[in-house]
Amino acid sequence: MYTIPIEFFQSPVSHKPLTLKSENILVDEDGNEFKKNAEFGFWNFIPSQRAPIYNETQWNSFKQLIDNFVISYNKHPEVNVSYAERQDAFDFGDFCKYYGNVLDIGCGPHKTPSYIKFRKNPDATYYGIDVLEGEHPKDLNFAQAMGEHLPFKDNTFDVTISGTSLLHFVDIKQGILEGLRVVKPDGYFCIWLGVKSKDAPKPKESPEWYSKLETPEGAENPFHYKRWTSEEFENIFKEVGAKLIEKEVHKIDEWRENVFFKLKK
Ligand SMILES: C[S@@+](CC[C@H](N)C(=O)[O-])C[C@H]1O[C@@H](n2cnc3c(N)ncnc32)[C@H](O)[C@@H]1O
């Protein structure tokens, strides 16, 4: 059902090549194994243990965030932008100008995010990773993986994209570095950042399920590690040596805007 070529993969833990140990198990030279999901046939690259890629605090924080996502996805699926025909998603899809092999990092739990579904270039091939298993079959070639530790070789994709996902990563800088690592030198990495001012009015009431969520250690709220400003985000690009080649700002209201960035390595 999912057809990601094995040659695309490398170990997300050791960064060494992966070989097939059996039809449903990939293994790296250090013995790290990754299994195919028995029900839906996608590879699961979430490491079974935290070491060596995370310390204990980061790992527990990541697991808390995932628990929160699962609850929100079940209780309130329509809040996910991939769910609906929305102008902001159409705008991001137009901005991405898909071609060749496209990887969506944090593609969401639904079948296809709407910035792909409604803005598809039929000549391109779409791949997606997310930490959540989500709904299946998806309309893109899916693998379960972490954006900070992608299971792909360097220079594999023509376009990499991330739609409102990076703010949920335990290590956002690592997420940006990975999105750039796996894109080809003549390709680009498109990021959709939702910016919200600290002065934005808080919702008058939160649903009961939301108020019960625990905030992961080091995070600002149950879902976001930090609400970055556009300028702060651009400073990370400089720190990681990324070239910002295009930027689009779509104002939503007094307090909120969507910012799209196109980066090259
Ligand atoms: C707000 S949703 C956006 C989903 C999709 N891009 C869209 O716009 O419809 C954020 C997604 O990021 C995923 N996510 C959170 N942390 C992640 C990580 N470290 N690596 C990959 N995906 C992650 C979540 O599971 C969730 O599906």
Image: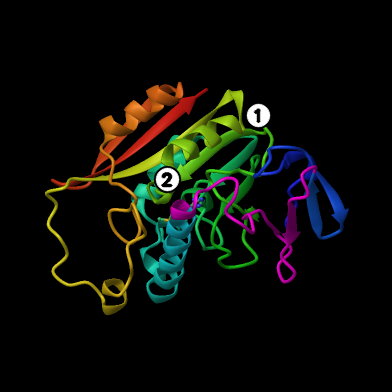
- Residue that appears at 43% across and 48% down: 170
Quadrant in the picture for residue 258: top left
Establish if 204 lies above or below 34: below
In the rendered view of the protein, which quadrant contains the N terminus? bottom right
Residue with the mark numbered 2: 166
Q: Left of 9 or right of it: where is 192?
A: left
In this picture, is 76 found above or below 5? below
Disc 1 target residue: 155
Q: Residue at point 65% right, 44% down?
A: 12
Q: Quadrant location of residue 183?
A: top right
In the displayed structure image, the side of residue 91 where residue 101 appears, left or right: right
Disc 2 crowd, CA 10 A, few/some/many (<14, 14-19, 20+): many
Q: Is residue 82 above or below residue 171?
A: below
Magenta-colored span:
29-58
* Mark 2 CB near ligand 1 (8 Å cut): no
Q: Nearer the viewer, residue 240 or 97?
A: 240
Image x and y of residue 10, in percent: 72, 41
Q: Is residue 11 left or right of 256 when viewed as pictured?
A: right
